[in-house]
Image (spheres, grey):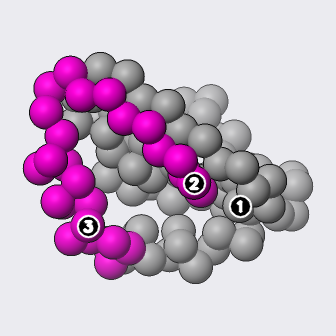
Amino acid sequence: MKIRPTFEQLWLRALPRVTGDYMWASVDGFHMYGSTKHQLMLYWLLKGSYERYTRKLFVRALEPGSRVLDVGAHIGLYALTAARAGAESVLAFEPNPSARA
């Protein structure tokens, strides 16, 4: 049985070619994308080596119904991780426009 790609998957694959600046990676079931300046971080995420142990500790510390405020969220990895772990609400802020995804 062939599985047809979704519009989102096709768009994310085409985005680097269309804009010449964006890339994406599938990490822990999330489709994360950012400009090419995030390329190294996305590479580490793909390898599973980006803050691997810190993320495990973070998930262990979360309880169902937790509220999470991610200040300095960068591309939102911890915000997404908190949402996946069952946090009741998650707010993420990245004040630096050049660091936002």
| Sooner in the amino-acid sequence: mark 2 or mark 1 | 2
Residue plotted at (29% across, 20% down): 88
Residue 25: x and y, percent?
Answer: 51, 59
Q: Which type of secondary structure does the marked residue at label 1 adopt?
A: loop
Residue plotted at (72% across, 49% down): 95
The answer to if 60 sits in the magenta stretch is yes
Q: CA distance from mark 2 to mark 3?
A: 16 Å
Q: Residues within 10 Å of mark 2 (few under 14, many from 20)?
A: some
Residue 38 shows in this picture:
yes
Q: CA distance from mark 2 to mark 1?
A: 9 Å
**Image quadrant where one finds the N terminus:** top left
Q: Residues within 10 Å of mark 1 (few under 14, many from 20)?
A: some
Residue 6: x and y, percent?
Answer: 54, 30
Q: Residues within 10 Å of mark 3 (few under 14, many from 20)?
A: few
- 15 left or right, relative to 73: right
Residue plotted at (36% across, 35% down): 68
Q: Which type of secondary structure does the marked residue at label 3 adopt?
A: helix
Locate residue 44: give its quadrant. bottom left
Q: Which type of secondary structure does the marked residue at label 2 adopt?
A: loop
| Mark in front: 2 vs 1 | 2
- 31 left or right, relative to 2: right
Which range is magenta?
A: 48-74
Looking at the image, residue 49 lies above or below residue 57: below
Reading the image, the residue beneath label 1 is 99
Reading the image, the residue beneath label 2 is 72
Say which of 42 and 99 sits in front.
99
The answer to if 52 sits in the magenta stretch is yes
- Of the numbered discs in the image, which one, if any, rests on residue 54? 3
